[in-house]
Image (cartoon, rainbow, N blue to C red):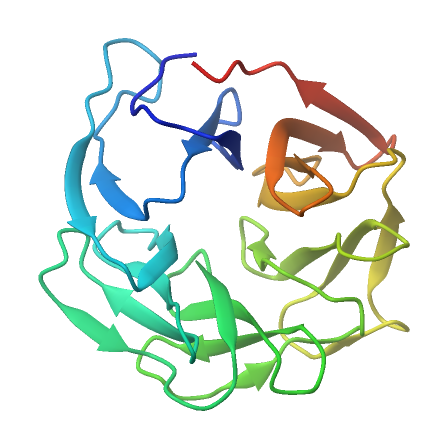
Amino acid sequence: PQAITSSLTGIGYARFAADQRRIAVMAFSRSYELSLAPFDPSGRGKVVATPAVRSPSLGWCSPSPAGDWLACTSRGAREDIVLMRPDGSDTVRLMDDAWKDRNPTWSPDGTRVGFMSGRSGEWELWSVRTDGSDLRQMTDLKADLSVTVWSADGKQAMSSASTRPPYGVWIFDASTMATRQTAKFFKNPLPQPFSAESWSPDGKLIAGSLLDVGGSPRTVAVWEVSTGTVRPLNVPLL
């Protein structure tokens, strides 16, 4: 592993490469500084990060499949979803209401953004088109869900139940609202909560983080769906 930035406090937020041979992870702090870092997916060459945006109000950003937009959470008394160019040159408020909306992720075709919201009374998953239209509730699982993790073809999605037992992941059809009767639940075999963050292109592996008692990611792990095995990865905090 190679450290790109310093003054870091934890490791998590794993993402599979397109060929599934490598995983990118983020060592993070609480500065909410967004940096751009072009890199060779093969792992050759040094990665150099260039600070792009330092914002006291925007965080938890996810890049679009084309890399031309970021979907971010606007933090504060109101939490909304905001689209922003990677260099901070343009912002569009995607959600603008009284409900708390967090942790946006893009569908693989880049047409929708999934996010967690408390607008139904529980933390459930919702999605909306990138022009702000066609708001849909994706789940009614009553499991305090967090991040929407899309399958490679966008037909399925998953999310973690990591704030209260039973800990595990829910997998469901992304085209209709999932319930406990229609979604599949896979229990986490480890005692610490697991946060799903990326689904391998072949659908066999889930990359994510093991959380500490405060809910912050501390260890990167890979979950093999067929066997139910969760394997922590020893990535040092450099």
Answer left or right for 222 relative to 141.
Answer: left
Quarter of the image that includes the N terminus: top left
Residue 45 visible in the snapshot:
yes
- In the figure, 130 relative to 89: above or below? below
The image quarter containing residue 136 is bottom right
Quarter of the image with the C terminus is top left
The residue under the point 67% across, 73% down is: 123
Residue 16 image offset from top left, x and y in percent? 51, 33
State which quadrant residue 34 falls in.
top left
Looking at the image, residue 94 sits to the left or right of residue 85; the answer is right
201 above or below 49? Answer: below
Residue 57, image x, y percentages: 30, 64
Q: How many marks?
A: 0
Furthest-left residue in view?
A: 89
* Position of 200 relative to 236 (above/below): below
Give the side of residue 119 with respect to residue 139, left or right.
Answer: left
Identify the residue shown where x is 87% and y is 71%.
180
* Residue 17 visible to the viewer: no
117 up-or-down from 235: above or below: below
Residue pictured at 63% horizontal, 60% vertical:
146
Asked whether 228 or 35 is in front, the reply is: 35
Where's residue 73, x and y in %? 39, 65
Residue 183 picture location, percent across and down: 82, 65
* Residue in the picture at 53% in, 27% down: 20
Which of the two residues, 184 or 238, is positioned nearer the viewer here? Answer: 238
Outermost residue, top side = 44
**Left or right: 218 as drawn, with respect to 107:** right
* Residue nearest the viewer, comparing 173 with 67: 67
